[in-house]
Image (spheres, helix red, strand yellow):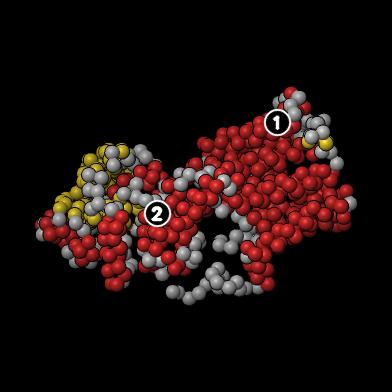
Amino acid sequence: MANPTPVAPEGRPRGNLAQRLYAAFDSPGRRRALHLVLLAILIVTPWLSSQYVTVILTNALLYVVLCLGLNVVVGYAGLLDLGYAAFFAVGAYTIGILTQQFGFNFWAAIPFALLAAALAGVIIGGPTLRLRSDYLAIVTLGFGEIVRFTARNLEITGGASGLSHIPEPSLFGWYIDSSIDFYYVFAALAVLAYIASQRLFDSRLGRAWLYVRHDEDAAEAMGINRVAVKLAAYVIGAIFGAVGGIFFSVNLGAISPESFSFQQSVLILMAVVLGGMGKIPGVILGAFIVVLGPELLREFDTLRLLIFAVLLLLIMLFRPSGIWPEKRS
Amino acid sequence: MLLQLNQVSLSFAGNSVLDEVAFGVAAGRIQSLIGPNGAGKTSLFNVITGFYRPQRGEITFDGERLVKRKPHSVTRLGIARTFQNVRLFREMSVLENVMAGQHCRSRAGALAAVLRLPSQRAEERRIRETSLECLDFVGLADSQERLATNLAYGHQRRVEIARALATEPKLLLLDEPAAGLNGSEKEALVELIRRIRDERGIAVLLIEHDMSLVMSVSEHISVLDHGSLITEGTPQAVANDPRVIEAYLGQDDEELAL
């Protein structure tokens, strides 16, 4: 064998404190314990914090769902998507339109929203996934803008002012309306998104994404249909985005095209890249940083976005593959 | 014939790469494809496996037509290949590399994975077991957890063969499997190729420059020169064929071992 690599992915974890800490969390025994602790924190937090904090945390949990979805596309399958907010919009608008204008029950409208997002994923993905990654980025950017402009110009989507008075959902006669209710809804969604991401990663499809990302030709030679596999990533990402959008719309009760801007797409992508593409805990961390960062810096007032930007730059400078990158890359 | 090529022609931008190539590979046979550098051997592999689309000609495999099929679909039909320059998924474990081969023999989708259906879990177990068995077959079961890139070159070549075997092929195409191997590794390779055929009944077609290896392992040899098949037959017949000697003597490099 050649000289050992300094990264030493095999055997005993080495390196600095951060690496050892991450390695500890990677072991299956401690992971279970960590899961329980995090779940307990997730359940208890809203009872210990103000309504303001609960609302911010709810938003962070929404971003966890969105970022985990984009992570399937960008992190697992390696497809750069600059229009991810479009799928978020499709989910939100489908619910808004069906419940508010057609009198659908919220729960009955969900399958339609998921279907619409999956369809949008196929429509945009089908013809474009043969493109090289940089071209794909441009096409997805355009797609994001098309969806936003369409929402802005159609009557059914309420034009520029969007849809308001989206009815609150009820479950067995109990209305989900308070900020704590929605906190728990998004906490449950984030947990589900986490489990789904993990299971997808450990599956045949999850491996296929890695194979295609590493070497498309070798993957094809092994019998993997690269277009089908990429399309699957796209559609799954779209569904995660739509789930976020579905509950986002009923949480706010109102949606407008500006909620689904290019900036939104970039923010989600930034969280994924910042946390560590392809690494679930990293992506979750990224989502929290992107949402909580500007809030924690609120006392700096007008300077806060500048300070936040500098912090992000510093992070990318010192940890170029993300705060908690995938072990292998 | 398991694999049959009829008048296959390929050209790139007017330059003829393959000119009406016709030959077959019988089921369960070990066959070699030889010829000077640039004769079109790897191009022929790429045509068979669907990476290149020939302008003219027919390719049939096991009763199915191959031309216009995508590579993944050719693999699913039962043709597996290795690459001239090893193309493992370098940053993945050895076992994960081999598991890639099982993709086309399994079917669980996203929903089955998210719900962890019993069928999906059984399939995952089967993928793992089959892949481990293939890895064991090439003698590298001990290295399953290591990253592919950290393996010695000779072992990487074996992992690539294990990965191809995991697709459960009827025909295995090996593109210069002995390149970069030392003497004892070459002997082990010859033994491995024989075992692939004898124990698994898989036909093997190899491109190889090492003539002593080709002569010792092949039952049939096809010779390609300037994109045309110039002769084929048993090792003895080919070795004594004046056209073959001429094709190689026309070369001014070191491939005069014949």
Which residue is rendered at x = 42% and y = 52% of the image?
B101
The three-letter amino acid code for the residue at tag 2 is Ala
Question: In terms of depth relative to the viewer, which is nearer, A266 or B180?
Answer: B180
The total of numbered circles placed on residues is 2
- Across and down, in percent, residue B150 comes to 47, 68
Which residue is rendered at x = 53% and y = 39% of the image?
A128
Q: Is residue A294 left or right of residue A122?
A: right
State the residue position of label 2.
B166
Q: In which quarter of the view is residue A168 placed?
A: top right
- Across and down, in percent, residue B139 comes to 37, 66
The three-letter amino acid code for the residue at tag 1 is Ala
**Residue A109, numbered circle:** 1
Q: In which quarter of the view is residue A306 placed?
A: bottom right
Question: In terms of depth relative to the viewer, which is nearer, B147 or A7?
Answer: B147
Quadrant including the N terminus of chain A: bottom left
Which residue is rendered at x = 67% and y = 65% of the image?
A30
Q: Chain of mark 1?
A: A
Please tell me whether mark 2 sits on a helix, a strand or a loop.
loop
Which residue is rendered at x = 22% and y = 48% of the image?
B26
Q: Is residue A140 left or right of residue A226?
A: right
- Across and down, in percent, residue B255 comes to 22, 64
- Across and down, in percent, residue A125 comes to 55, 38
Spatial CA distance of label 2 from label 1 is 44 Å
The extreme right residue here reads: A50
How many C-alpha atoms fall within 10 Å of the one at disc 2: few (<14), some, or many (≥20)?
many
